[in-house]
Each structure stands twice: as structure tokens, then as C-alpha cells.
């Protein structure tokens, strides 16, 4: 395998990128001058140096000092009575930019495959359970997954895993409502759609 194929294989690991697109990325880099490639390499290195994963919600954030938690979790004005569970960071950012939700978040780390025997190693369900036990002010958990068979399966799985904990503490579990149409990826939803989905949660 030559250098072009090796680099294309790396690009194919990016979300939503197939073989043809991966090759286009490689040829694009080959056509740019060396300064462009060197700058890209440095930015990738700096990305790992200047970001960290929040110890509370598992969101990646820009570190300015030696913080262990992100600005959302550290903010005293964040509504601690609600906790939204999302699949990934890009979903969290989409909801945050809509300015229709002001509570806490938890990044599950993926969706639960419909046929899967090692679910607990694929998503942060144990970490989520521990977080809920620590949140003394929590009144509602909102499950915010993409509207798809795998998203629906994840919703059901998380509900089952949290049922006993939530029943003991009288915590309500809700899901995004019909503001989202079937097949919708949460990160691509517009502000009005997210607002309606939150308003109509059940």
C-alpha cells in the first residue's frame, strides 16, 4: 500500500467519509503547497494539546488553565435540574447554539447497536449512572438522540438502565418530541426544529 492509499485509509475513518471522498482529500493536499500541509500538521498537534475532555459531561473543550470540567458544568447559572443525554459533541454544540436549552449535558459517546452484546464497553452508561447518583438537584433527564432505528434502540436501552435510579429519586425521563422527523441527525437540525422537539418532549 503506497502513501496515497495509506492516507486515504485514515481519512475513511472520518464520519461520513467514503473511499472516493478520502482520495479527493489526499489529492487536494498534494495540490497545495508545503506550507499548507505543515500548518495542518501543527494545528492537529495543537488540537490535542489545547483541548481536554470534561470529567463531568465528557464533552471536549478548550483548556485555558488546568480545568477538569468545561465551562457549561462549571457555570453556576447552568440549570442543574435537567440533564440532556446526547450521542456526541457535535449534537451538544447544535443544541447549545440554538439557545433553547440551559441545563446540563452528558455525552454518551455513541449509539447502541441493535445487535450488540458488549454495550457497556461501547457507551458511557456506567459513568452516566454514577453522574445521576451525584446530581442532587436533578429532576428530569432528556434523551436527545437522532430519530433512527439505532437512536430509538439507544433511547430504550438508556431508559432501562436508568429506571431503578430514577424511580428511587423521582426523576422524570423524557425524549425529544415530534419536532424532529424520522431520519433526522440531531447535529444538522435547525434552531426552530430543536425548539419544537424540546417543547414537545414526552
Image: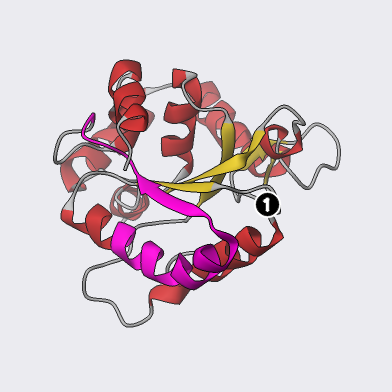
Please tell me in which quadrant of the rendered image residue 126 appears: bottom right
Which quarter of the rendered picture does the N terminus lie within? bottom left
* Residue at image point 48% right, 30% down: 93
* Residue at image point 56% right, 68% down: 168
Q: Is residue 197 left or right of residue 138?
A: left
* Magenta part, dominant SS: helix
Span colored in magenta? 154-179
| Coloration of the structure image | secondary structure
198 vs 163: above or below: above
Residue 182 x %, y %: 14, 40
Q: Is residue 168 magenta?
A: yes
Residue closest to the eye, 173 or 77: 173
Residue 154 x %, y %: 31, 60
For label 1, the residue is: 56
Residue 113 seen in render: yes
Please tell me in which quadrant of the rendered image residue 23 appears: top left
Residue closest to the eye, 177 or 123: 177
Amino acid at each position: 500500500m503506497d502513501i496515497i492509499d495509506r492516507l486515504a485509509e485514515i481519512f475513511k475513518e472520518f464520519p461520513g467519509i467514503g473511499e472516493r471522498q478520502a482520495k479527493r482529500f489526499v489529492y487536494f493536499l498534494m495540490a497545495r503547497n508545503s506550507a499548507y500541509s505543515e500548518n495542518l500538521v501543527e494545528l492537529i498537534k495543537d488540537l490535542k494539546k489545547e483541548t481536554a475532555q470534561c470529567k463531568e459531561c465528557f464533552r471536549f473543550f478548550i483548556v485555558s488553565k488546568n480545568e477538569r470540567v468545561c465551562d457549561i458544568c462549571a457555570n453556576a447559572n447552568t440549570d442543574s435540574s435537567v440533564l440532556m443525554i446526547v450521542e456526541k459533541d457535535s449534537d451538544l454544540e447544535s443544541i447549545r447554539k440554538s439557545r433553547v436549552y440551559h441545563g446540563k449535558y452528558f455525552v454518551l459517546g455513541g449509539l447502541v447497536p441493535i445487535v450488540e452484546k458488549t454495550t457497556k464497553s461501547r457507551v458511557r452508561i456506567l459513568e452516566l449512572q454514577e453522574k445521576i447518583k451525584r446530581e442532587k438537584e436533578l429532576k428530569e433527564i432528556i434523551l436527545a438522540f437522532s430519530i433512527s432505528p439505532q437512536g430509538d434502540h439507544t433511547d430504550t436501552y438508556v431508559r432501562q438502565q436508568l429506571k431503578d435510579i430514577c424511580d428511587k429519586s423521582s426523576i422524570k425521563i423524557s425524549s425529544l418530541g415530534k419536532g424532529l422527523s424520522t431520519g433526522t441527525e440531531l447535529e444538522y437540525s435547525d434552531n426552530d426544529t430543536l425548539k419544537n422537539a424540546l417543547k414537545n418532549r414526552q
